Amino acid sequence: MIGPDTPIRLVFVGPPGSGKGTQAKLLNEKFGVTCIGTGDLLRSAVREGTPSGKLAEPYMKRGELVPDEVVNARVNEYFSGPSPPKKFLLDGYPRNTSQAEFLDKSLKAAGISLTRVILFDVPDDELVRRLETRGTIEARPDDSIEVIRNRLKLYHETTEPVVGHYRRSGLLAEIRATGTKDDIHKQVVAILG
Ligand code: AMP
């Protein structure tokens, strides 16, 4: 059971289209968890035309990672201030081992420890189907077929090593994220409780 005192300080790791954002939203609605989604933060920076949005846009269009300094600085703002979030969830960050190391330092400096890292496991062919559908519905420029393939390749090459980083620290829990939204939510809650 999750109560008001249940510590929730999470990282969601998983390929694009694995449902991290959907599950993040549910945890926010049900338990007031602050969702820090670097993809969402970057998309709003692009919309607002801020300097980091302008810098990030071409990388995002190609399905490449935005330079670490940009995302690290944005995430660090949450933890370096006077009132860091008590219950939080990082969605889509860290995406490579150097971001994971930066996050370790940033949290350590704030005296905060992660409670869990949840890996969303979905086979690639299912992801391609989901992302193509999302591309049509949400009109996301990075959900076109070539960019999808690029993002999946990048996930396997660059983000999967982050899984090893957290497995070694004993924080990793894994879910098979192929069921319904509610099934997956139940698996997430079981891990937290
Ligand atoms: P997402 O919505 O998480 O799939 O992110 C969309 C795009 O934003 C990615 O394809 C990257 O270009 C960029 N992005 C999001 N998070 C990060 C991150 N942690 N590091 C670098 N780039 C990121």
Image: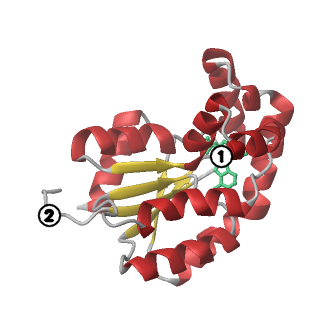
Q: Position of residue 135 (x, y in %)?
A: 68, 23
Question: Sequence-wise, which precedes: disc 1 or disc 2?
Answer: 2
Note whether 22 is above or below 86 in the view shown.
above
| Figure quadrant of the C terminus | bottom left
| Residue picked out by circle 2 | 5
Eye-nearest disc, 1 or 2: 2
Who's the residue at 44% across and 82% down the image? 108
Note whether 136 is above or below 61 in the view shown.
above
Residue 84 located left or right of residue 96:
left
- The answer, for residue 94, to whether it is visible in the render is no
- Badge 2: residue crowd in 10 Å (few <14, some 14–19, many ≥20): few
Note whether 184 is above or below 66 in the view shown.
above
Dot 1 falls on a residue whose secondary structure is loop
Which corner quadrant of the image does residue 45 belong to? Answer: top right
Dot 2 falls on a residue whose secondary structure is loop
Any mark on residue 123, and which?
Answer: 1
What is the count of numbered marks? 2
Residue 107 located left or right of residue 136:
left
- Badge 1: residue crowd in 10 Å (few <14, some 14–19, many ≥20): few
Who's the residue at 39% across and 72% down the image? 114
* Callout 1 amino acid: Pro
Q: Does the closest atom of ligand 1 sit within 8 Å of the Cβ of label 2?
A: no
Which corner quadrant of the image does residue 164 belong to? Answer: bottom right
| Figure quadrant of the N terminus | bottom left
Q: How is the image coloured?
A: secondary structure
Who's the residue at 41% across and 48% down the image? 35
Q: Position of residue 78 (x, y in %)?
A: 44, 60
Nearest the viewer among 82 and 56 is 82
Q: Position of residue 146 (x, y in %)?
A: 86, 33
Any mark on residue 15, and which?
Answer: none
* Callout 2 amino acid: Asp
